[in-house]
């Protein structure tokens, strides 16, 4: 459904008290969207999977040709596979359209 679209992934809150908050925006691409289970598989375009915490809440911004979508959730898995550096992102509360935004504005 959103396969191939660019994504900005941004940490919004640490779940663990010992965690380190990361204010960087991480560039990804939608690899696969599992509608039934509400998972998005993201290909991380950066070098280090360890920058992505498994103990934090994230905002995921998906740029399509016509709109900028937003969803929140957590990364439940991160791994290297034949396709690249993969993140399994569990969506909470569905998608929202970012009103009054141009999809190209969010992308770096």
Image (cartoon, rainbow, N blue to C red):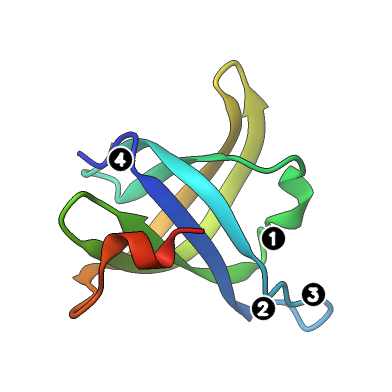
Crowding at label 4, few (<14), some or many (≥20) Cα neighbours within 10 Å?
A: some
Total labels: the figure holds 4
Q: Quadrant of residue 17?
A: bottom right
User: Looking at the image, which residue sits at the far right?
Assistant: 18
Distance Cα–Cα, label 3 vs label 4: 28 Å
Q: Earlier in the sequence, mark 3 or mark 2?
A: 2
Query: Is label 1 in a helix, a strand or a loop?
Result: loop
Query: Is label 3 in a helix, a strand or a loop?
Result: loop
Q: Earlier in the sequence, mark 3 or mark 1?
A: 3
Query: Is label 2 in a helix, a strand or a loop?
Result: strand
Q: Earlier in the sequence, mark 3 or mark 4?
A: 3
The residue that appears at 18% across and 79% down in the rendered structure is 99
Labels 2 and 1 touching (C-beta < 8 A): yes
Q: Which residue is mark 2?
A: 14
Distance Cα–Cα, label 2 vs label 1: 9 Å
Distance Cα–Cα, label 2 vs label 4: 25 Å
Q: Which residue is mark 3?
A: 19
Q: Quadrant of residue 93?
A: bottom left
Q: Earlier in the sequence, mark 2 or mark 1?
A: 2
Q: Foreground residue, 31 or 8?
A: 8
Labels 3 and 2 touching (C-beta < 8 A): yes
Q: Which residue is mark 4?
A: 33
In percent of width and height, residue 47 lies at 75, 40
Labels 3 and 4 touching (C-beta < 8 A): no
Distance Cα–Cα, label 1 vs label 4: 20 Å
């Amino acid at each position: 459904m959103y396969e191939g679209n660019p994504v900005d992934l941004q940490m919004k809150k640490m779940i663990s008290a010992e965690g380190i908050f990361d204010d960087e925006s991480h560039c990804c691409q939608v690899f696969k969207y599992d509608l039934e289970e509400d998972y998005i598989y993201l290909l991380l375009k950066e070098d280090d999977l360890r920058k992505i915490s498994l103990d934090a809440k994230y905002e995921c911004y998906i740029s399509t040709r016509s709109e900028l979508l937003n969803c929140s959730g957590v990364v439940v898995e991160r791994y290297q596979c034949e396709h690249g550096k993969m993140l399994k992102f569990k969506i909470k509360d569905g998608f929202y359209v970012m009103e009054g935004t141009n999809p190209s504005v969010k992308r770096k």
